[in-house]
Image (cartoon, helix red, strand yellow):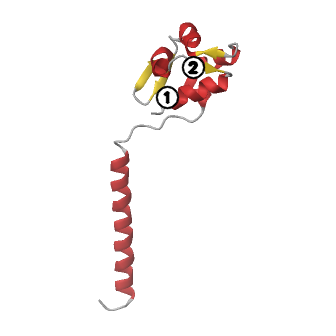
Amino acid sequence: MADNKRSRDKKADDKDRRQRERELDEARHRADEAEPIQDNATEQLGDLDEVLEAHSYPTTTNELTERYGDYEVETQNGWKTIDEVLASTGNQTYTSATDVRKRILGLIHR
């Protein structure tokens, strides 16, 4: 094809069309992905965040599950109780609400 205005316009149009097709293809693939979990801990832990802040530290997993085990948090696989989330951790000791929050968030992001 000769290098003239018409051929340059056609190349530009083809490039734009291919880019739109790539974007649509990416969007179709992303539609199957799970929604990302929010990074803001207080939005994820809701009321639990407030009670963790008010709790006395140091504390253990057993104390937390005994007291707050029925609280639910959103995980990648739906809603689970704190008892279910912390079940795999054993009886660890936590020195602050931040420690507990980090542990819970780490477990629900698996």
Q: Nearer the viewer, mark 2 or mark 1?
A: 2
Query: Image check: 78 left or right of 47?
Result: left
Pointers 2 and 1 in contact (C-beta within 8 Å): no
**Residue 64 picture location, percent across and down:** 58, 13
Q: Is residue 62 above or below residue 43?
A: above
**Is disc 2 placed on a helix, strand or loop?**
loop
Query: Image check: 97 left or right of 44?
Result: right
Neighbour tally class for label 2: few under 14, some 14-19, many 20 plus, Cα within 10 Å: few
Lower position in the chain sequence, tag 2 or tag 1: 2
**Residue 81 picture location, percent across and down:** 47, 16
Q: Is residue 72 above or below residue 15?
A: above
Q: Quadrant of the N terminus?
A: bottom left
Q: Which mark is residue 92?
A: 2
Q: Is residue 107 above or below residue 62?
A: below
The Cα atoms of the two marked residues, 2 and 1, are separated by: 14 Å
Neighbour tally class for label 1: few under 14, some 14-19, many 20 plus, Cα within 10 Å: some
Q: Quadrant of the C terminus?
A: top left
Q: Label 1 sits on what residue type? A: Leu
**Residue 66 picture location, percent across and down:** 54, 7
Query: Image check: 91 left or right of 28?
Result: right
**Is disc 1 placed on a helix, strand or loop?**
helix
Query: Image check: 3 left or right of 71?
Result: left
Q: Which mark is residue 107?
A: 1
Give the quarter of the image for residue 63.
Answer: top right
Q: Label 2 sits on what residue type? A: Gln
Q: Say which of 9 and 34 sits in front.
A: 34
Q: Say which of 60 and 32 sits in front.
A: 60
Q: Which mark is residue 66?
A: none
**Residue 31 picture location, percent across and down:** 36, 44
Q: Residue at x 39, y 28 (%)?
A: 77
Furthest toward the left, the residue is 1
